[in-house]
Amino acid sequence: MTAVKLVPKLHEAVLAELLAEIVRGDHEEGAKLPKEQVLADRYGVSRYVARQAIQALRDRGLVAVTHGVGAFVAPRHRWNLFDPVLLEAMLDGPDAKAARAEGVECAALVWPEVAALAAERRTADALARLEAADDAQELRNALAAGARNRFLGQIVSTLDGDGAPARAMTPGDPAAYADVVGAVRARDGEAARAAMSAIVRRPSGSRRR
């Protein structure tokens, strides 16, 4: 079978360019983006493709669209920071160091609570999945699933993936989680919280309060 090379959709290429510009600060908060036709001409695409790119920015909270007026860059506190495309752009942008430090800080606060919930809500099936994990990533995935909180699960899965801000702070050796697994087995939330706090590492560049 002939291998098929995956090519990004046209609007995704335009989205990547616009994302990088906004993250760099080329378009300040409240600034109006160029009109769809201007963007279409700039990137050599149709107006429909330009509209798709604007919609993708809107879906991620980066712009607010007023029909008949245009698209305006939204305040940063409205951005969906857990969107992987936006997160990747931020980690490639000028604010990468701060974004990475904040991601690490967030994960350091959240992981112990995930472990505590996984212990307190432990079921036989959840424990079996945890104990059957072959590697550290699979084990952390089992912990997140066992916590049974979709919002916390979204946070840790975004911050803990390959290349994500907090990936380097969690041990890669499954044996390092032995105390966490033992606490989950015992349904001891406090012990699970303490054990996870003990193994979560902060890189030296992470900010402390």
Image: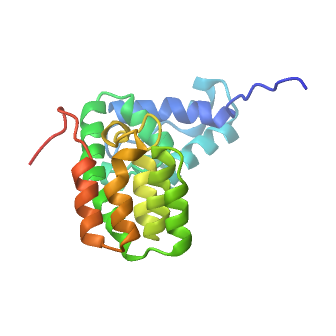
- Residue 115 in view of the camera: yes
- Residue sitting farthest toward the right: 1
Q: Nearer the viewer, residue 195 or 46?
A: 195
Q: Nearer the viewer, residue 152 or 175?
A: 175
Q: Quadrant of residue 196?
A: bottom left
Can residue 65 be seen here? Answer: no
Q: How many marks?
A: 0
Image position, residue 72 (x, y; %): 42, 47
Location of residue 128 in the rendering, given as x and y in whole percent from the top left corner: 54, 64
Tell me what residue is drawn at x 58 percent, y 32 percent.
Answer: 14
The one of 150 and 82 positioned closer to us in this rendering: 150
User: Front-most of 2 and 136?
Assistant: 136
Residue found 34% across the figure and 43% down from its top: 170
The correct choice, above or below, for 152 with respect to 59 in the image is below
Say left or right for 108 vs 120. Answer: left
Point out the image quarter for the N terminus: top right
The residue that appears at 29% across and 60% down in the rendered structure is 112
Q: Is 4 placed left or right of 103 in the picture? A: right
**Residue at the (45%, 60%) spot, across then down:** 144
